[in-house]
Image (cartoon, rainbow, N blue to C red):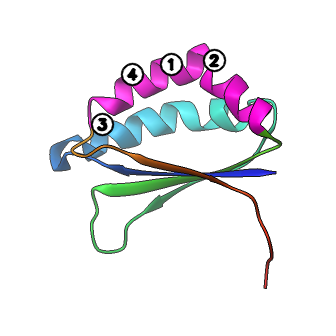
């Protein structure tokens, strides 16, 4: 399983626009083949910072999503709202305590 974390910092005045984009796309993303989990987190102290946390079967599933029209359209709408470059990490679970 591939765990994907993406940290995004938005312009303060663009947060509502991002939340609308996410609301319109979240069920479609979650329905992508190989997507097992999707959640949106908001920074506790900085309300313009969000993190997406998703689980994918493998690299191929994530790459299939990243090559999809859904990703291209959603990302094009989202990236213009950033105030900083997003940070993305792919990980494998080692242990749950």
The magenta region covers 59-81
Q: Give me the residue at 55% from left, 24% from top.
A: 71
Give the label, 2 or 3, closer to the camera: 2
The mark that comes first in sequence, 2 or 4, is 2
Badge 3: residue crowd in 10 Å (few <14, some 14–19, many ≥20): some
Is the residue 88 above or below the residue 62 in the image? Answer: below
Position of residue 73 measured from the top left corner of the image (x, y, whole percent): 47, 18
Q: Considering the numbered disc 2 on the image, is that residue within a helix, a strand or a loop? A: loop
Residue 17 — which label?
3
Q: Please state the horizontal and vertical placement of residue 38, each as a whole percent of the image.
A: 65, 49
Measure how far apart labels 2 and 1 are at the Cα level. Answer: 6 Å
Front one among 40 and 79: 79
Disc 1 versus disc 3: distance between alpha carbons?
17 Å
Residues marked 4 and 1 touching at CB (< 8 Å): yes
Residue 74 magenta-highlighted? yes
Q: Is residue 24 left or right of residue 94?
A: left
In the picture provided, is 88 more to the left or to the right than 85? right
**C-beta proximity under 8 Å, tags 2 and 1:** yes
Q: Nearer the viewer, residue 3 or 44?
A: 3
Say whether residue 8 is visible: yes
Mark drawn on residue 72: 1
- x 21%, y 44%: residue: 83
Q: Which residue is mark 4?
A: 76
Quarter of the image holding residue 62? top right
Q: Secondary structure beneath disc 1?
A: helix
Q: Residue 53 sits in which quadrant? A: bottom right
Marks 1 and 3: CB-CB under 8 Å? Answer: no
Q: Which mark is residue 68?
A: 2
């Amino acid at each position: 399983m591939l765990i994907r974390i993406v940290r995004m910092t938005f312009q303060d005045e663009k947060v509502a626009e991002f939340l609308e984009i996410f609301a319109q796309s979240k069920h479609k993303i979650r329905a992508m083949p190989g997507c097992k989990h999707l959640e949106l987190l908001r920074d506790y102290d900085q309300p313009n910072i969000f993190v997406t946390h998703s689980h994918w079967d493998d690299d191929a599933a994530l790459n299939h999503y990243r090559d999809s029209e859904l990703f291209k359209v959603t990302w094009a709408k989202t990236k213009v709202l950033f105030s900083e470059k997003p940070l993305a990490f792919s990980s494998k679970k080692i242990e749950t305590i």
